Structure formats: C-alpha cells, structure tokens
Image (spheres, rainbow, N blue to C red):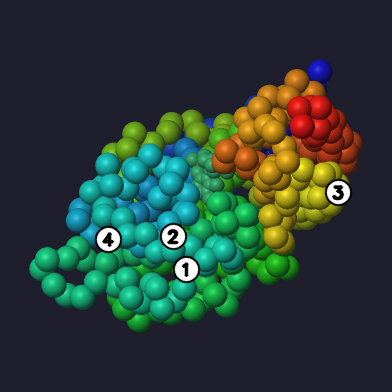
C-alpha cells in the first residue's frame, strides 16, 4: 500500500530532476570554497533573498543556530516567540552551544509578536541583566498554523529592532510559502531582516539543506561558526545541485500545495467529529482537533489512519497537523478525507453503542 504522508513537508523525496542534477553536479571541496555547485546555490539564494551572501547549511536548525551564534555573544539575550520553532524544537541549541539567553515574547494567533511586547522586552542598560541583542521572527509560522507574516509587519519589527540597536533574524524555513500565499517576493519579506534562513528540504522538495543569507561580513562569521559546529561539508555540491533545482522549479508550484490544503480542509470540515482551526489553512498546513464526542485520543486515530495508509502529525492529545506537499496529489487528498470519515464514523458508532 502506498502511503499518503501528511506528517510534514520534510518527508518529501527528491524529484526526478533533482536526482538527475545530483548525479551530474560539478563538485569540489566546499571547505576550501571550491565546490562550484554550492557556490552557485549560495549566490542564487542570496540574490533571491536580496542579501549579499549565502551559506549552505545542513538543516534549518543549523541555519538558525549559526545565525544566532554569529549575531550574539555568550550571555546576550535573543527574543523569540513562545511558539517559535527555535524556542520549542531546536533542542535548546542557542543556549546549550552558544550561551545565548532566550526571552519568550507571546506569539499572537497570527504568528506575530506585538510591537509593544518587543519594546517592553528590551533590557535597560543594567549590569544585573543580559544584553538584548536580537529579535527572531518565523515566516510562515509553524505552530501558529502555517500563517504568513506580511511585509509591512516584518518592516515594522525591523525598524523597531534597528532603532534600538538590535538585529532581526528571520526563520524563513517556509518563506517561499509565505511569498506565494501573499503574492509578494521572498526578497521583500526578507528585506527588513539582517539574516534569514530558508529550507530547501521542505515544500521545495530537496533532500537536504537550508541556506542562511545576510551581509558578506555576517556570512564570513557564520562560515567560521558552521565549521565549529562540524557543519563544513566537502563535496556538498551533490546536495546543492538538488537545491538549485528546488529554487528553479519548485517555488511557484507551492500554490498547488496551498490549494490542496484548502480542499483537504473543506473535506475534513464536513466530517462530524472534526473541528478545524479557525481560518485554517493559511498555506500548506491544516490544523484540526477531535470534538468531545469522539471517544479516542489523537494517537489512536492516527494509528487507525495509518492502517488505512494515511500518516498524520499528532500535535496534541486531540490535535493534528496535516501538511500538503509535492507528493500529495488530488487523489491523495480525497483518500485522506475518506480515511478520516471511515475512522471517525467507526468511532461515532462505537460511541453510540457504548452510550
Ligand atoms: N519543522 C519540522 C519539525 O521540526 C517540527 C516540521 O515538520 O515542520 N524552522 C521551522 C519554522 C520549521 O518548521 C523547522 C522544521 C525548522 C526551522 C528546522 O528545520 P530542520 O528540520 O531542517 O532542522
């Protein structure tokens, strides 16, 4: 049985064009800066994000870690949303490896941090307190439902940060989803940020890697930190080749993933027992919960769905995240809806029998 894997867009396998590019890529030693394919990817990425330079890194987590370590000294404070991926899901790397103190600012439901909350969070010049150095935003915002932040909002945070001598980092793991969903360029979304990471290995379908972009001086520093972290890769052009195909071929098509997420949400919303998050989906993520009548927890429902070939993300006791991507077509969307309907109908029946 072929699996319909909606757990994440990280599960995407490389496309045939990527596999072909990987086998024929020109290679060199990237630690010497001599891999032509890595160099080309870094230049393309920097140009698309409107920055001077780029650095190919192993993952989104490494991109955020390298960026924050390059911006901050030990003991400095980084302001992060309380639902930020860097705060929740990056194993505390900025603190464990960089000695960076993290300060959580409440994320609002639309993924933003209130400007006043950022302002209130900036530390005074006082020897008792850490030095506030950085604000980090996430676009699209994963835990807030895959919601896209606007150019205007990002500019407002950039202006505020810069007026107070802070830097703005943008975790743009899915910045191209944000750009496509809003009909703006990734360059405009990244413009206010001093550094931005984006992932090649999510909706863009490449097998490995992210790119960190910023000024030439910043990237030079980031390059050293990547080496410290063991992230200096040698003939990394085999991976970068797929990243180039990702940027050339897979950005505009993200609109199809967003349209399929809407179809999936509409179909699921009609099934008794499913409560769709308000306004879901914004991009390629559908968030939903089980209503009280369903006598199962999300883990149990996920197991029953898996028996029907549908894999979903469990993100709470009664909550799911479903992510559309390159390998999810219209048929897969229909089958996923049908699998939910079958499982929850069974649940409803066992509930009424028990009642
Ligand atoms: N997110 C993954 C999981 O870790 C939750 C997912 O399935 O969505 N920033 C954001 C906003 C992300 O969503 C992720 C991955 C990362 C950074 C980290 O990227 P990787 O997995 O490449 O380290």
Which callout, 2 or 1, points at the residue further toward the start of the chain?
2
Instruction: Give me the C-alpha separation between circle 1 and circle 3.
Output: 33 Å
| Picture residue at 63% right of the left edge, 60% below the top | 147
Residue 3 position (above or below residue 209) = above
Camera sees residue 150: yes
Which callout, 4 or 1, points at the residue further toward the start of the chain?
4
Q: Quadrant of residue 229?
A: top left
Q: Residues within 10 Å of mark 2 (few under 14, many from 20)?
A: many
Which callout, 3 or 4, points at the residue further toward the start of the chain?
4
Please tell me the numbered disc located at residue 81.
Answer: 2
Residue reaching furthest to the left:
127
Residue 203 position (above or below residue 54) = above
| Picture residue at 88% right of the left edge, 38% below the top | 334
> Can you identify the residue that label 4 sits on?
77
Which quarter of the rendered picture does the N terminus lie within?
top right
Residue 309: image location, x then y, percent: 77, 24
Residue 104 position (above or below residue 163) = above
Q: Nearer the viewer, mark 3 or mark 4?
A: 3
Q: Nearer the viewer, residue 93 or 239?
A: 93
Q: Nearer the viewer, mark 4 or mark 1?
A: 1
Q: Nearer the viewer, mark 1 or mark 3?
A: 3
Q: Nearer the viewer, mark 2 or mark 4?
A: 2
Task: Find out whether the residues at labels 3 and 4 contact each other: C-beta distance under 8 Å.
Answer: no
> Can you identify the residue that label 3 sits on?
270
Q: Residues within 10 Å of mark 1 (few under 14, many from 20)?
A: many
Which callout, 1 or 3, points at the residue further toward the start of the chain?
1
> Can you identify the residue that label 1 sits on?
113
């Amino acid at each position: 049985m072929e699996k319909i894997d909606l757990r994440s867009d990280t599960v995407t396998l490389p496309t045939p064009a990527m596999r072909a590019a990987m086998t024929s890529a020109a290679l060199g030693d990237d630690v010497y800066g001599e891999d032509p394919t890595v160099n080309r990817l870094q230049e393309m990425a920097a140009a698309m994000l409107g920055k001077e330079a780029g650095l190919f890194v192993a993952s989104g987590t490494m991109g955020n870690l390298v960026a924050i370590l390059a911006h901050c000294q030990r003991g400095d404070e980084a302001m992060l949303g309380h639902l930020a991926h860097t705060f929740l899901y990056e194993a505390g790397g900025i603190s464990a490896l960089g000695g960076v103190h993290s300060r959580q600012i409440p994320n609002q439901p639309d993924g933003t941090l209130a400007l006043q909350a950022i302002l209130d969070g900036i530390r005074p010049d006082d020897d008792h307190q850490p030095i506030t150095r950085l604000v980090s935003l996430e676009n699209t915002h994963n835990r807030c439902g895959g919601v896209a932040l606007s150019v205007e909002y990002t500019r407002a945070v950039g202006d505020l940060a810069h007026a107070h001598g802070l830097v703005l980092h943008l975790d743009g793991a899915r910045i191209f989803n944000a750009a496509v969903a809003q009909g703006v360029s990734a360059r405009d979304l990244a413009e206010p940020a001093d550094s931005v990471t984006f992932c090649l290995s999510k909706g863009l379908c490449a097998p490995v890697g992210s790119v960190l972009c910023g000024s030439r001086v910043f990237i030079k520093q980031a390059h050293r930190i990547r080496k410290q972290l063991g992230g200096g890769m040698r003939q990394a052009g085999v991976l970068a080749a797929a990243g180039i195909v990702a940027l050339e071929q897979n950005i505009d098509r993200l609109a199809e993933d967003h349209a399929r997420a809407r179809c999936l949400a509409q179909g699921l919303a009609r099934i008794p027992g499913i409560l769709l998050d308000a306004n879901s989906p914004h991009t390629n993520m559908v968030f939903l919960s089980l209503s009280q009548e369903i006598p199962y927890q999300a883990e149990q429902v996920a197991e029953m769905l898996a028996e029907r070939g549908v894999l979903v993300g469990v993100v709470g006791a009664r909550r799911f995240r479903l992510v559309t991507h390159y390998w999810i077509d219209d048929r897969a969307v229909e089958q996923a809806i049908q699998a939910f309907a079958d499982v929850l109908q069974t649940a409803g029946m066992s509930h009424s029998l028990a009642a």
